[in-house]
Amino acid sequence: MAESALTPEQKDLIGPVLGKIPSGVFILIVGDGRGRETAMLASWVQQASFDPPLLSVAVNSKRYLNDWLKESPAAVVSCVGKSRSGAFFKQFGKGFEPDEAAFEGVETTRGATGLPLLADAIGSLEGAIVGSLPAGDHTIYLLRVDNAVRGRGFESDEPIVHMRKNGFHY
């Protein structure tokens, strides 16, 4: 993928408008296939297909999760609700080192993939990565959804819809 050739003036014009594209807030959960598990806050998640059900998930190319997804393609996407957003942002917003415990103090169950599911999420979609595409400074993964588990917030919570002040920054 080619480097951006945008001038500072173009970035000043594009950034605020690009930031108005709404996204949700999700937790991407992956394992390395050898027992380590981690999670990251993700906002670039979107349904990409009805049949089979696919999600697109963007991960910054600098994250070690990219290596884990190549080695062990199982993944979970959990939808964050407004009522638990503060706790989830605090827990997962900072990111984790590969050997750091990501789920300490967070109630989880296990799903069909064997990965943790967040009990207080609206719900979790789990499946396998079936494709990827380099996209600038991110990699876009296609997650085939094989299972869904409703969390405590499914009936009562609303998903977060989030916009950034500038489309060139998280």
Image (tube, rainbow, N blue to C red):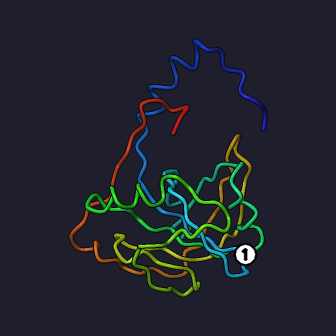
Residue 13: x and y in percent read 50, 17
In the displayed structure, 167 sits above or below 97; it is: above
Viewer-side residue, 156 vs 17: 156
Q: Residue furthest left?
A: 156
Looking at the rendering, which quadrant does residue 22 occupy? top left
**Left or right of 118: which side holds 7?**
right
Looking at the rendering, which quadrant does residue 28 occupy? bottom right
Question: What residue is rendered at 44% in x and 61% in y?
Answer: 91
Mark 1 Cα within 10 Å, few/some/many (few <14, many 20+)? some
**Left or right of 117: which side holds 68?**
right
Q: Residue furthest top?
A: 9
Question: What residue is rendered at 48% in x and 53% in y?
Answer: 93
Question: What residue is rendered at 34% in x and 70% in y?
Answer: 122
**Left or right of 106: which side holds 4?**
right
Across the whole image, how many numbered discs are drawn on residues?
A: 1
Q: Which residue is mark 1?
A: 72
The secondary structure type at the circle numbered 1 is loop
In the displayed structure, 42 sits above or below 31; it is: above
Q: Amino acid at mark 1?
A: Ser
Viewer-side residue, 141 vs 109: 109
Residue 32: x and y in percent read 71, 74
Q: In which quadrant of the rendered image does the N terminus lie?
A: top right
Residue 68: x and y in percent read 72, 67
